[in-house]
Image: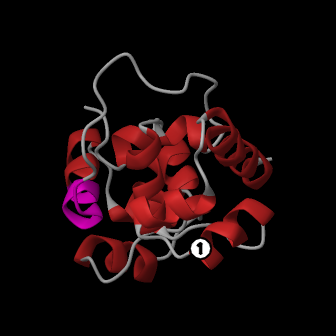
Amino acid sequence: MFPAIFINRLKEFLVSEENLTQIAVSQATNISPSNLNEYLSGKHLPDFQNFVSLLEFFSCSADYLLGLTDIPSNEEKLLPVPPFAPQFKKVLGELRVTQYYLVEKTKKFSYNQLQGWLKGNNEPTLPCLIRLAQTLDCSVDYLIGRTK
């Protein structure tokens, strides 16, 4: 199950690095210690920005941290994550997928959700990122612009 794998992978990263404390990760990622503790205890999942901060700090793929692959990073170089709205527009264009398809055909998303993401008013939650990637038949790393 996704949240359990995410928590275990996050804990593995913390344990595998010598002298790495939650405080050090918190300071390096600008994630509050209480938020980081909530992620590690499974009380909450990170928002999009904190998730990206964790990816960049641990230099791992989104798909690995989410438990969608067992490979910590792709062979190709992981790119910095661009703002989600333009990246999402780009992916929809590249894959030739319409909002209509995402809403009416899949029944997984609402127009309001999509418009919020496309206009940059908000970003998807981690479960929505996974559903989007599965619906678009792509990796989460590709969806968020971490790989080409």
Number of numbered tags placed on the structure image: 1
Pointer 1 residue: 33
Q: Which residues are magenta?
A: 82-89
Left or right side of 62 for 66: right
Asked whether the viewer can see residue 128, the reply is: no
Q: At which x and y percent is residue 70? A: 64, 24
Furthest residue to the top?
Answer: 75
Q: At which x and y percent is residue 122? A: 37, 79
Q: At which x and y percent is residue 3? A: 74, 55
Residue type of the residue flagged with mark 1? Pro
Task: Answer above or below: position of 71 versus 30.
Answer: above
Is residue 31 found inside the magenta-colored segment of the image? no
Task: Answer above or below: position of 145 versus 18.
Answer: below
Task: Answer above or below: position of 79 versus 51.
Answer: above
The answer to which of 109 and 78 lies nearer the viewer is 78
Residue beneath the point at 79% across and 65% down? 41
Left or right side of 23 for 48: left
Asked whether the viewer can see residue 98, the reply is: yes
Left or right side of 41 for 49: left
Q: What colouring method underlies this structural image? A: secondary structure
Q: At which x and y percent is residue 66? A: 61, 45
Residue beneath the point at 56% across and 51% down? 130
The answer to which of 86 and 60 lies nearer the viewer is 60
Image quarter where the C terminus lies is top left
